[in-house]
Image (spheres, coloured by chain):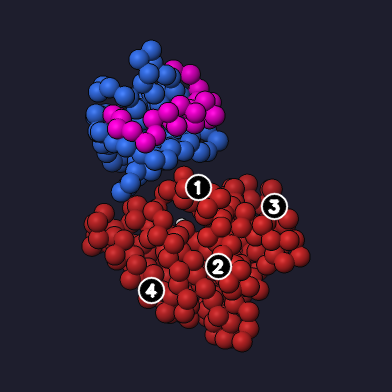
Chain colours: A red, B blue
Amino acid sequence: MQRPVLVVFPHPDDEAFGVSGSISKFTNQGIPVTYICMTLGEMGRNMGKPTFATRESLPHIRRSELEEACRLAGIKDLRRFGLRDKTVEFEDQEQLADRVLEVIKELDPQLIITFYPGYSVHPDHDACGAAVIRAARKLPEKERPVINCIAFAHNTIEDLGEPDVKRDVSDVIDQKLSVLQAHRSQTEAMVQAMKEQIDAKDPEVMGRFITEKFWTYKW
Amino acid sequence: MKPIQQQDVQRELETFMNQDVYLHLETTNGAYASHFNEKFFSAGAYIRNGLVRFSRGQITGEGPYRIGLKMDLGWIYAEGLTDWELTDNGQLLLAGHDHDGKLAVALELSHEPF
Ligand SMILES: [Zn+2]
């Protein structure tokens, strides 16, 4: 059995846009993937198009969307941390890092994928990435797993340079699009807007989905 | 009001923890937002003298700041906070003023009703 890959994000659908191709490639090769999803995206503003979710039904809907997305991406181990959307940064950061560290110690992952702290725009994204880095820092440097981060702040390239990991996921693009569409409440409007291009496999739209980019965290 | 000093506000927030306190929380984009810009969808909400109790209060960000107050069964949250003051009767007032200096968000705590 190969060492697993650990994916840590705060919101259901964070994995869909930039990582679900990579995840699909791993699981298709038999590499187990564990996904820590910290919240249920309870505060999301997308309610489906036409609207079908309410503020109260949204977490239930997103939970089943998340489970379906995991099934489609081949993720068999989903760990929901039960935090609330938009509050990750306000929690006790030391305790949160310890929860992540427990999972790292349990799994001994070959790779962790998360957000780059400070370069991921949403405070939950930054706090999530920071918790993972803080957790890994508690291990001796030689024992820390490789951490590949997603970053999309405007100053990313300026500060961090070009991403050092670029993964072509064109061979699993249909799987990736199915994961994206599984998060129906969040992606339906976008998918509708792009449906023609997606159906026609428009090179510009597809280009954005085909290459997944990561920055390896440097200690 | 004066620009937020994160550590000062953090210290004051903690003096309101673990006791019943009165909350004023408000967001507003102004009643004229849609009048001046028809594409703008005006929305806002407020609660005055909500009686709340929180066990954790945290200010984060690099300005504008965010504050989260953790209650037994929920959360109170505000973003876009820029300025603060502590009144003579111990009320902690925080506000977010937009680029024109207009109020966009207010978060206030008091031991007595407002
Ligand atoms: Zn997110």
Tag 3 residue: A160
Cβ of disc 2 within 8 Å of ligand 1?
Answer: no
Q: Helix or strand or loop: what does disc 2 sit on?
A: helix
The label nearer to you, 2 versus 3, is 2
Q: From what the image shows, is residue A2 above or below residue A21?
A: below
Tag 1 residue: A92
Q: Helix or strand or loop: what does disc 3 sit on?
A: helix
Q: From what the image shows, is residue A15 above or below residue B107?
A: below
Mark 3 / mark 4, whichever is N-terminal: 4
The label nearer to you, 3 versus 4, is 4
Mark 2 / mark 3, whichever is N-terminal: 2
Q: How many marks?
A: 4
| Residue drawn at the location 25% of the way across and 60% of the way down | A57
Q: Chain of mark 3?
A: A
Q: Is residue A120 left or right of residue B86?
A: right
Q: Is residue B26 left or right of residue A18?
A: left
Tag 4 residue: A67
